[in-house]
Image (cartoon, rainbow, N blue to C red):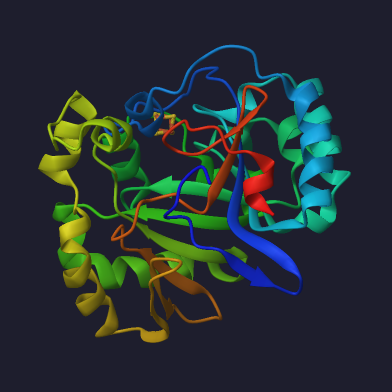
Amino acid sequence: MYAPDVPIIRRDGHRWMESFLVILDRRGCPKACPYCTAEITDWPKGDDRLERLPPMLDELHEAGTRFEWLTISGNGEPSLYPVGVLRQLRESLDAHPELFVDRRFQSSGELFFRPDAFEIFHDYVMELTRVHVDPDEDMRILRYRRDHTKTETYAGAQIGLNHVLLRSTFGTLLDDLERYRDEIGGRLQSLTLKILNVDTRADERTRTGRVQSEQSRWIQEHALLGEDADRVIERVSTRFAVKREYDPVLDRVVWDLGNEVPLILVTKRERYGRLHVVFHEGRLIDYALREIPINDLR
Ligand code: SF4
């Protein structure tokens, strides 16, 4: 077993994992988030080896593995890839629709300025991350120049929104969540409250808890951390009805934001991403960059 803390979930004769992520190599990003998760994780850079994806999906099919989510991510902005590569990726994934329940494309927002790339994934949920409900303030903190919320492509997209929990906005959190819900309306598929990780991999290896990067220092200074999860749960529960009490397997609480939209908090009490499988540079790995043998996913 590649990691003994990975829970085994079986349903309908299948082994279920939470997420299958395709993490493409870094091709830049128009944002400069002070907590940049791509910088902090420092994934190896090299050849994507996308030709290895189809046989791996075949093997996952044979193993009977299923995933709640497919997520395309970029270790940066995935829509900066050539359209031909994105199309090839889509075709490989379409060959195995049975593996995934839902599909997401994670973007900095740049995707909405690239209609060709958007078109290829137009029926995916577009996953965006914000720190502030006000677009100008979000642009100031995350240091980007073009407001994607004013594009036509954005107006036609299904949105999965991550809201980063900051100390400075904790006081207005409940009103902010309602504002997201009301502004995005029926296109909002989910709203996830995001607790940032401080140097996940470094701490995983060393267990020293020492902060090793400027991104981690920013997080410690400005963001709510795992230790604040109980405070967040208490505050959110004063306005929104709990749909699913804390689930230790998925490590999450789910509320009803209204309009059937789930409001989700992953508390980070458990090792984050332990139910995620990452395809990166032709290999299946976890967030600690450990290789995952397909046999361990049966
Ligand atoms: S959008 Fe993602 S890759 Fe780009 S700066 Fe922000 S965290 Fe880093």
Name the residue rendered at 21%, 66% in the picture. Answer: 172
Q: Which image quarter: residue 226? A: bottom left
Residue at position x 58%, y 38% in the image: 292
> Which quadrant of the figure has residue 12?
bottom right
Left or right of 35 on screen, residue 65: right
Outermost residue on the top side: it is 46
Asked if residue 96 is positioned above or below residue 143 in the image, the reply reads below
Q: In the displayed structure, does residue 45 sit left or right of residue 10? A: left
Asked if 149 appears above or below 241 in the picture, the reply is: above
**Would residue 70 be seen by someone viewing this image from the given angle?**
no
Residue situated in front as seen by the camera: 79 or 134 = 79
Q: Is residue 85 above or below residue 182?
A: above
The C terminus appears in which quarter of the rendering? Answer: bottom right
State whether residue 239 appears in this view.
yes
Total marks shown come to 0
Q: Which residue is at the front of the view, 139 or 73?
A: 73
Residue 111, x across and y down, in percent: 62, 35
Q: Residue furthest front?
A: 1
Residue shown at 53% from the left, 74% from the top: 261
In this picture, is 90 found above or below 135? above
Residue that appears at 56% across and 65% down = 188
Using residue 104 as the reference point, say whether residue 52 is left or right of it.
Answer: right
Q: Position of residue 57 (x, y in %)?
A: 79, 41
Q: Residue 138 in the image: x percent, y percent?
A: 33, 43
Residue 44 position in % (x across, y down): 48, 18
Q: Nearer the viewer, residue 235 or 14?
A: 14
Q: On the image, which quarter does residue 159 sit in?
A: bottom right
Ligand 1 located in image quadrant: top left
Along the horizontal axis of the image, is 227 left or right of 126?
left
